[in-house]
Amino acid sequence: MDVETHTIPEPFEIVTLPHLRQQAASVLIEHGCSILELPERCIITLPAGTTRQEIIPRTRCQRYRLTLPDGYQLTQICPRRETEFSDLYLNAPALDGQT
């Protein structure tokens, strides 16, 4: 039984991270994101049409499923006391090479 549920999708545009690995940046750009790298942070602008759904049940961190217009999904983890930065997890490619 799948216990993971989601809230209603809502439009979503920007993620702020403390840093971003080059390999992850390449994947995000490939899926239509734009990236602004500053010395103290990395700002990712997601393509128009991206949605965000909270993953329930809640844990110590708020978890969201981000779905880009091309169907690619990311997971965003937001520590409850952190108001500025979050973690972003890219989906691993499937064994057959599809994402």
Image (spheres, rainbow, N blue to C red):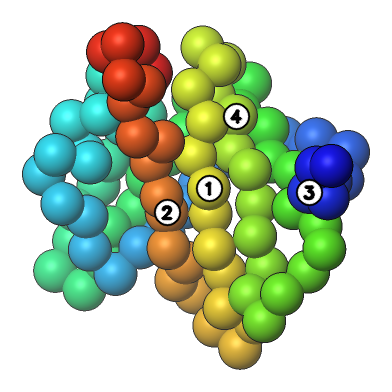
The residue tagged 4 is: 67
Query: What amino acid is labelled 1 in the image?
Result: Thr
Reading the chain from its start, which is encountered first: label 4 or label 2? 4
- Tell me which label, 2 or 3, sits earlier in the chain: 3
Identify the element where label 3 is drawn.
loop
Residue at image mark 2: 88
Q: Nearer the viewer, residue 5 or 15?
A: 5
Q: Quadrant of residue 58?
A: bottom right
Outermost residue to the front: 1
Residues under numbered marks 2 and 1 in contact, where contact means CB atoms less than 8 Å apart: yes
The residue under the point 35% across, 34% down is 92
What is the CA distance from the residue labelled 3 to the residue labelled 4?
A: 16 Å
Element on which disc 1 rests: strand
Q: Is residue 91 left or right of residue 84?
A: left
Is residue 83 at all visible to an observer of this figure? no
The reply to whether discs 2 and 3 touch (Cβ–Cβ < 8 Å) is: no
- Taking 95 as reference, is 54 above or below it? below
Residue type marked 3: Glu
Going by the numbered disc 4, the residue's amino acid type is Thr
Label 3 sits on residue: 4
Left or right: residue 44 versus residue 15 is left
